[in-house]
Amino acid sequence: MEKYKHMPDEWDRWLDASVDRDCRPADILAAMVAANYDPAYAEQVIGERIARRRTGLPAAERAPYRYGTPRIRHQGNLIRTGDRDVRVVMRLDQPVVAVLDNVLSDDECDAVVALARDRLAPSATLSPATGENQVRDTRTSRGAFLPEGDNALLRRLNRRIAQITNTPVEHGEALHVLHYGVGAEYKPHPDYFDPNSPGFAATLRRGGQRIATLIVYLNDVEDAGDTVFPKLGLSVVPKKGAAVYFEYMNEEGQLDEATLHGGAPVGAGEKWVLTKWVRQDVFR
């Protein structure tokens, strides 16, 4: 039987009542899944309902995002780091998005892939309702975190990326490598955590909100696999050693919904990327 992805009025009223009674999100989710609701859909509507209750306003009625000075700094079309000149190929100011080239050398890309290859596991997403890591069909890649340790290459890359993003090294999460085979994708999503979703409370205590992302392409993809920004009509084609950077939190703590993005399905070959997520405080 096909899983439900819509709610009749009686279930809508039940969900409101459950949230108003402060029922545990995990219990609400379990009840909906037992009633044949699609788990990803159920998590989404539970999170939205809890957020609406806490803020009192739907997203359409919140104050518009205020753009200030971008964190990323460049001189003309260059970002000069301690060991490499990175070229700015394209940039937007609202939202802040930049396509960069020469971020990693070919040899560095190959070395990162070699480090990650034997550590890959199915990619998970964090449930906004329960905080559990769950493997979903919205994200079909395999991934691995690469803690720096005493690895000279990772230490060098972490410092270079901190200079590119103009943020302290200590504010970055561990480098994360993702591998996409043919057909693998990551459906559009934000990288920030909704502060009104109970499942994100624990990760927000580890370093505050995510504020920016750098995605570095570690190989040339034979076909497709673009990074897409559906609200912008923008599609970034993977190029070995190049990257796309975007930021999504301002000084007032507002979150920029225009940075919704995803990884389009790979049509042929494979795609390797290196992701760095930057937090507002020291990440622990």
Image (cartoon, rainbow, N blue to C red):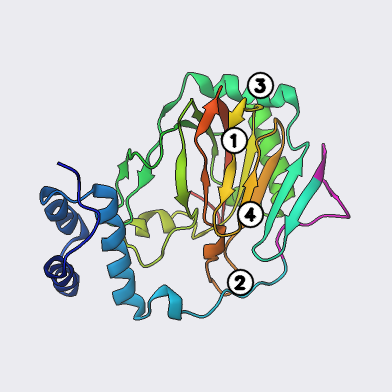
Q: Which residue is mark 1?
A: 274
The three-letter code of the residue at mark 1 reads: Leu
Q: Quadrant of residue 84?
A: top right
Magenta segment includes 167: no
Q: Is residue 250 left or right of residue 89?
A: left
Q: Position of residue 176 (x, y in %)?
A: 53, 36
Question: Cα distance, mark 4 to mark 3?
Answer: 24 Å
Q: CA distance from mark 3 to mark 1?
A: 11 Å
Which residue is tagged 2?
Answer: 251
Please state if 188 lies on the left or on the right of 58 as rendered.
right
Question: Real-space Cα distance between discs 1 and 2?
Answer: 27 Å
> Which of the two discs, 3 and 2, labels the residue nearer the N terminus?
3
Q: Furthest-right residue in view?
A: 76
Front residue of 200 and 52 = 52
Q: Which mark is residue 246?
A: 4
Kind of element beneath mark 1: strand
**Tag 4 near tag 2, CB within 8 Å:** no
Identify whether 284 is placed above or below 232. above
Report, in whole angstroms, how far the alpha carbon at label 1 lies from the one at label 4. Answer: 14 Å
Q: CA–CA distance between discs 4 and 2?
A: 15 Å
The structure residue drawn at horizontal position 30% and vertical position 62%, both measured from the top left corner, is 47
Residue 35 coordinates in the image, percent (x, y) = 11, 52
Q: Which type of secondary structure does the marked residue at label 4 adopt? A: strand
Sequence-first tag of 4 and 3: 3
Question: Is 85 placed above or below 184 here?
Answer: below
Which region shows up in magenta?
A: 70-87
